[in-house]
Image: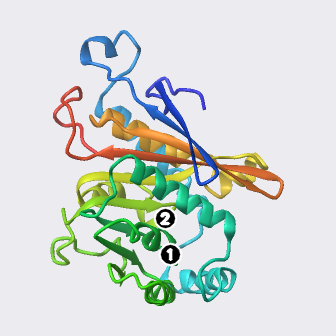
Amino acid sequence: MAPSPRGLSPAGDWGSLRRLGGVVAVVVSVRKISLDNAGEMGYNCGMKDIDYFGNLWQSRKGVSPGHSPELWDSRAEEWIAELGEDGLGKPTMQLRVRAAVGYLVNRGLVGADTSIIDIGCGPGLFVLEFAKYAKRVVGLDYSPKFAEYGRKLAELRGLTNAEFLVEDFDTLDLDSAKLAGAFDLAFSSISPAVSSPSKMEKFMRLSRSWCNNISFAKVTDNPEISKRSGRDGTGFYSLFNILWLSGYYPETYYYDESRPGSICRYGSILWDVSQKDSRTNEENSL
């Protein structure tokens, strides 16, 4: 993915190459750029550029289907049928879930004292995997069928530290719900609930420490189909640059999932909301 003249490509000093659950994840640590040398490297850290990437991120919304509890309930029926009563179906997805959670566990961000919330949790696969390691895990989705399925799986597996909320994240008042700053890690994977700068800002308010967002980085099938479905990496690339320009130091890692006729590359962006420097203007914020 080529760098934009207005921002950074999600790359930097290469870290270690890790194999988690059979999936290769490339860990990237971003170089810190000071205001002194930012100009020399051609990076403009102004509000104008954040707006540019915000508009770029939302430019794909016009080709995305509308989202509603009814729509996701209908999809839930299909997913639940594939996953089965034991929740062990869709093996490629199971592998991706274990890889993502395994990375965060190995990174030291998930442990016995950790509280986590998963926004747009769907059937709860990430919630249940996190619950094996964390103290408390909350899954939030506005599909009642997904939430009920997740509860049943948690009970089946004896995971008493996993809970599911049925809420519309767009309209949810975080303060009234006592969710603002209530978690060590706010997590989301390919969810329309966290798919724009304003939604990401709200998502960040959930955490007192780390945030992790997973989205499509690249799908090697028909480019037009990838673009129409939002799988061309636009959201991933835009979020990375918005975070960077806002003063955060996002880390990225990737893993590939083989599909019939294509390879789907997922990009995961991880950042600490408590660590933000002053290299941007004071008015600059996500």
Q: Which mark is residue 122?
A: 1
- Left/right of residue 85 with respect to residue 180 in the rendered view: right
Nearer the observer: mark 2 or 1; the answer is 1
Residue type at mark 2?
Ser
Residue 199, image quadrant:
bottom left
Residue located beneath label 2 in the image: 191
Q: Which mark is residue 163?
A: none
Res. 233 visible in picture = no
Image quadrant in which the N terminus is located: top right
Which of the two labelled residues, at mark 2 and mark 1, occupies the earlier sequence position? 1
How many numbered discs, if any? 2
- Percent position of residue 275, x then y: 21, 39
Asked if residue 199 is positioned above or below residue 52 in the image, the reply reads below
Whether the residues at callouts 2 and 1 have beta carbons within 8 Å, the answer is yes
Secondary structure found at label 2: loop
Mark 1, other Cα within 10 Å: few <14 / some 14–19 / many ≥20: many
| Depth check, front residue: 10 or 65 | 10
What residue do we see at 47% from left, 55% from top? 102
Image quadrant in which the C terminus is located: top left
- Left/right of residue 60 with respect to residue 38 in the rendered view: right
What residue do we see at 64% from left, 51% from top? 22
Q: Gap in Å between the C-alphas at discs 2 and 1?
A: 9 Å
- Left/right of residue 269 with respect to residue 177 in the rendered view: right
Asked if residue 94 is positioned above or below residue 164 in the image, the reply reads above
What residue do we see at 37% from left, 65% from top? 133
Secondary structure found at label 1: loop
- Percent position of residue 10, x then y: 49, 33
Res. 35 visible in picture = yes
Mark 2, other Cα within 10 Å: few <14 / some 14–19 / many ≥20: some
| Depth check, front residue: 134 or 167 | 134
What residue do we see at 63% from left, 77% from top? 88
